[in-house]
Amino acid sequence: MSAPTGVSATLAARQAELVATLVAGARTPAGFDETRIAATRRALLRKRAGEAAKAWPLLAAALGTGWSDAFAADRAGTEPAGALRDGWDVARVLRARGGLPGAAAAELRAREAELRYDGTSAPRPRRLAAVRRVLVRVMR
């Protein structure tokens, strides 16, 4: 398939601009209604918060009705990294501020014991945790 040309290239560029506006905090492109863009940003953040809540149930439950606001405060203007990573980043920010409730702190500790996450690349299993899982299977 050949590279887009003419109208297709212009449309592709406008679409990329719009996506960057909606999820990565870029300026609103000319010709778009700022009010509608803001509403769409909020809706997308709520959807991301819902997905992250599934990956981090104790964190979301511990924050209760404040979960969506805490999530939006941290993740607004950042590209989606996936539910696991988005929730992990929120948990780390809350922990650094001293605002991570007990059950959520335990959930974060458990994840950090099981997985390595540097804040930029996908979480990977820790070697010791992987060995432990294999030993448990063998011992059964």
Image (spheres, helix red, strand yellow):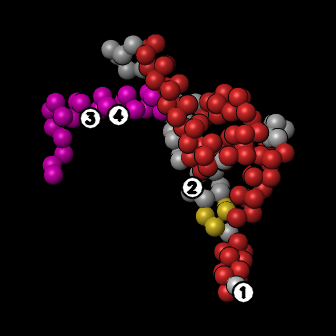
Say above or below: 76 vs 132: above
* Viewer can see residue 81: yes
Residue drawn at x 15%, y 32% is: 6
Residue drawn at x 49%, y 19% is: 38
- C-alpha separation, residue under disc 4 versus residue under disc 3: 6 Å
The amino acid type of the residue labelled 1 equals Met
Q: Which residue is mark 2?
A: 121
Question: Residue 125's image quarter?
Answer: bottom right
Most foreground residue, 5 or 80: 80
* Viewer can see residue 26: no
Q: Which residue is mark 1?
A: 139
Q: Which residue is mark 3?
A: 12
The amino acid type of the residue labelled 4 equals Ala
Judging from the image, what secondary structure is the residue with disc 1 in?
A: helix
Q: Are marks 4 and 2 in contact (CB under 8 Å)?
A: no
Query: Left or right: where does residue 12 sit relative to residue 50?
Result: left
Q: Which residue is mark 4?
A: 16
Q: Give the main secondary structure, helix, strand or loop, of the magenta stretch.
A: helix
Q: Are marks 4 and 3 in contact (CB under 8 Å)?
A: yes
- C-alpha separation, residue under disc 1 versus residue under disc 4: 52 Å
Q: Earlier in the sequence, mark 3 or mark 2?
A: 3
Residue drawn at x 84%, y 38% is: 98
Say above or below: 76 vs 2: above
Q: Earlier in the sequence, mark 4 or mark 2?
A: 4
Circle 2 packing at 10 Å, graded few (<14), some (14-19), many (20+), is: few
- Range of residues picked out in magenta: 1-23
Judging from the image, what secondary structure is the residue with disc 2 in?
A: loop
Q: Earlier in the sequence, mark 1 or mark 2?
A: 2
